């Protein structure tokens, strides 16, 4: 009887926690490797090889943040990620602000990634994006296919993420490693064509690079759906950050070395441009397919995270209760649908912009919105007393987050403040509706 009960308990836990190490790692890698690696070389082209300083600082900062989130996940293995950590340390108002900021960064980023997917598909099938309406339609088809996959259930979404991650990580690494043999060192000269000081270049390029590294924390968000979260989440977070970070920096370094700066600035598909120059049109087409797979997988991963963030906040009475309701598959369907609808509206509202314009605009807004939760999470670990060590790492992670945030520029920061303040009425409405929110977050 005891053995039978034990097996039954294990099966029950597995069913209720469908995400294992590889699924959690794939969620991190898949969320990090999206549109950034394929479009950022063009965005950073004005800074030439000096942009590699930003990439190096960004990767070091991402590793510091990954280590900090690993400590937080061990100490507080609960659903919600940055939101849950900040609420435990600083209370309801701070928790709501971080949840709201993080939630905005996710669904707005989903919109940008969906548009980037359309751009990739346009390189393969030009007719699909020959008009702004067709391009928007292509983006929305991808968004809603991923929505349906997530509505089916977390296990299916996790398995799909493992497959998509493998399909994009391996070719990206191969591109970077093989491309090194064809790099022309003359493309790295002049080192800093912008004429700006190196500290300024570093400040600007760090936040641009962070777009490609955002997502390092996503394994902490669906913690209650992950098996052995105290062990799995730290491993998945650090392993996923290193895999995605190294692959991204390697690929972008190669692109800079393969394509002259003046050509790179005007390229809407810089990695495909690089591949085409070395291996011909077929290679360029292959990279376009890789970009489409990569962005598609990123949409899928961020949809899963978007629903989990709103679910955790709703469980604690900070978001409307509908976000906390699960369907028969154990899926927060309402949160998935709301995130998809908001991303859809953003795509429709912005469809007349060019791909690069939309990408840059959303990049700065979304990255600024996510750096605030990063900084607050690092502060939460310092506030907690930094048990099990890591206080110095968390302090460095906090400094890095603030440094990266300062590079966003006045316009992006102003938009971030406006979006953050837009959540204040929601917070006070929920306070009045609940007549006092729970004293501790769910899962504590």
Image: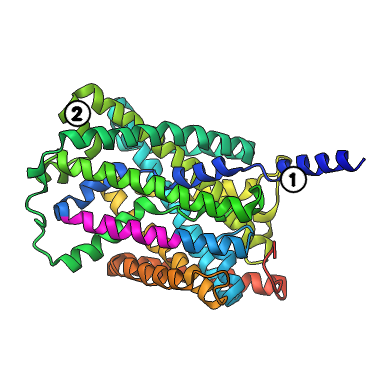
> Left or right: where does residue 51 sit relative to residue 207?
left
For discs 2 and 1, the disc positioned in front in the rendered view? 1
Q: Nearer the viewer, residue 225 or 292?
A: 225
Residue drawn at x 54%, y 55% is: 234
Quadrant assignment for the C terminus: bottom right
Spot occupied by residue 296 in the image (x, y as percentages of width and height):
43, 37
Q: Which residue is mark 1?
A: 13
Q: Secondary structure at mark 1?
A: helix
Residue 206 is marked as none
Q: Which residue is mark 2?
A: 276
Magenta span has 129? no
Query: Who comes first in sequence, dot 2 or dot 1?
Result: 1
Q: Nearer the viewer, residue 397 or 365?
A: 397
- Residue 142, above or below 379: above
Spot occupied by residue 442 in the image (x, y as percentages of width and height):
69, 63
Task: Report which quarter residue 291 is drawn in.
Answer: top left
Spot occupied by residue 360 in the image (x, y as percentages of width and height):
29, 53
- Residue 253, above or below 274: below
Spot occupied by residue 203 in the image (x, y as percentages of width and height):
25, 65
Majority secondary structure of magenta residues = helix
Q: Which contiguous range is marked in magenta?
A: 50-65
Q: Secondary structure at mark 2?
A: helix
Colour pattern of the rendering: rainbow
> Left or right: where does residue 39 sit relative to residue 95?
left
Residue drawn at x 54%, y 63% is: 71
Residue drawn at x 71%, y 76% is: 436
> Left or right: where does residue 48 sit relative to residue 133?
left
- Residue 229, above or below 290: below
> Left or right: where does residue 181 sit relative to residue 32?
left
The residue carrying pointer 1 sits among few (fewer than 14), some (14 to 19) or many (20 or more) residues within 10 Å by Cα, namely: some
Residue drawn at x 41%, y 62% is: 64
């Amino acid at each position: 009887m005891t053995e039978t009960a034990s097996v039954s308990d294990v099966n029950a836990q597995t069913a209720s926690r469908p995400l294992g190490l590889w699924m959690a790692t794939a969620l991190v890698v898949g969320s990090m490797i999206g549109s950034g690696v394929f479009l950022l070389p063009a965005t950073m082209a004005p800074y030439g090889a000096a942009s590699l300083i930003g990439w190096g600082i960004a990767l070091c900062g991402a590793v510091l943040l990954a280590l900090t989130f690993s400590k937080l996940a061990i100490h507080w293995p609960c659903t919600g990620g940055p939101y849950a950590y900040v609420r435990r340390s600083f209370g309801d108002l701070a928790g709501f602000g971080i949840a709201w900021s993080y939630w905005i960064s996710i669904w707005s980023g989903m919109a940008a990634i969906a548009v980037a997917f359309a751009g990739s598909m346009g390189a393969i099938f030009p007719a699909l994006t020959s008009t702004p309406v067709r391009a928007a339609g292509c983006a929305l088809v991808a968004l809603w296919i991923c929505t349906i996959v997530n509505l089916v259930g977390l296990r299916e979404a996790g398995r799909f993420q493992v497959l998509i991650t493998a399909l994009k990580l391996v070719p990206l690494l191969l591109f970077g490693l093989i491309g090194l043999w064809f790099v022309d060192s003359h493309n790295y000269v002049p080192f800093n064509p912008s004429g700006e000081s190196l500290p300024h270049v570093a400040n600007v390029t760090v936040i641009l690079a962070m777009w490609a590294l955002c997502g390092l924390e996503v394994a902490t968000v669906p913690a209650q759906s992950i098996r052995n979260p105290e062990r799995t989440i730290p491993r998945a977070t650090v392993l996923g950050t290193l895999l995605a970070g190294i692959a991204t920096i390697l690929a972008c370094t190669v692109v800079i070395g393969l394509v002259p700066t003046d050509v790179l600035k005007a390229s809407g598909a810089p990695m495909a441009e690089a591949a085409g120059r070395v291996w011909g049109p077929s290679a360029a087409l292959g990279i376009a397919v890789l970009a489409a797979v990569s962005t598609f997988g990123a949409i899928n991963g961020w949809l899963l995270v978007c629903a989990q963030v709103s679910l955790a906040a709703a469980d604690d009475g900070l978001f409307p209760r509908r976000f906390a309701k699960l369907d028969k598959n154990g899926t927060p369907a309402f949160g998935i649908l709301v995130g998809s609808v908001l991303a859809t509206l953003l795509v429709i509202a912005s469809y007349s912009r060019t791909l690069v314009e939309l990408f840059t605009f959303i990049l700065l807004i979304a990255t600024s919105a996510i750096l605030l939760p990063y900084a607050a999470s690092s502060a939460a670990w310092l506030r907690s007393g930094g048990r099990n060590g890591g206080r110095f790492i968390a302090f460095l992670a906090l400094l890095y987050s603030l440094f990266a945030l300062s590079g966003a520029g006045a316009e992006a920061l102003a938009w971030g403040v406006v979006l953050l303040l837009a959540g204040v009425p929601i917070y006070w409405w929920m306070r009045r509706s609940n007549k006092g929110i729970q004293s501790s977050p769910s899962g504590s």
